[in-house]
Amino acid sequence: MELASADDALGLLRAAWSGVFALLCLGIAFNIRDVAFRIYQFTMYRGPFAPGFGFSPTLIRVVGGFLGAAVFVECAVSVAELLQ
């Protein structure tokens, strides 16, 4: 695959970054190495302002799943546009 211009290279970089971010978000959603609880614990005990009622590791996993799915679709669309 040869890149025709700098815009193609930038598009490829954007697709790669989106892919990495999607994997990180899906890792949070699937709770790899109990990361959702670690994020929860960090924000509850080390932040200057503790989050309020309703903030839980489950919410972190759900938001990570939705965000990961959305960014994964964006990555797939970017790669499809580059391959045309």
Image (tube, rainbow, N blue to C red):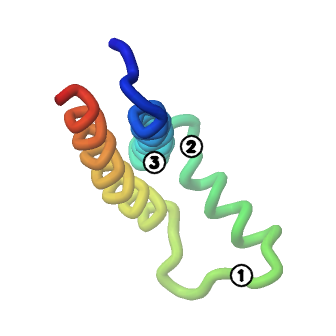
Q: Earlier in the sequence, mark 3 or mark 2?
A: 3
Coordinates of residue 4 in the picture (x, y in percent): 37, 25
Q: Is residue 64 left or right of residue 57?
A: left
Residue at left offset 42%, top offset 39% = 7
Residue identifier under label 1: 50
Q: Secondary structure at mark 1?
A: loop
- Give the Cα separation between the discs numbered 3 and 1: 22 Å
Residue 78 shows in the view: yes
Q: Secondary structure at mark 3?
A: helix
Residue identifier under label 3: 25
Quarter where residue 83 is shown = top left
Q: Is residue 39 above or below residue 54?
A: above
Residue sticking out furthest to the left: 84
Residue at left offset 45%, top offset 42% = 14
Label 1 crowding class (10 Å Cα cut-off): few <14, some 14-19, many 20+?
few
Mark number displayed over residue 34? 2
Label 3 crowding class (10 Å Cα cut-off): few <14, some 14-19, many 20+?
many
Which one is nearer the viewer's eye here, 7 or 19? Answer: 7
Coordinates of residue 19 in the picture (x, y in percent): 42, 37
Q: Disc 2 residue type?
A: Asp
Quarter where residue 1 is shown = top left
Residue at left offset 50%, top offset 39% = 17
Q: Is residue 68 left or right of residue 42?
A: left
Residue at left offset 59%, top offset 87% = 52
CB atoms at circles 3 and 1 under 8 Å apart? no
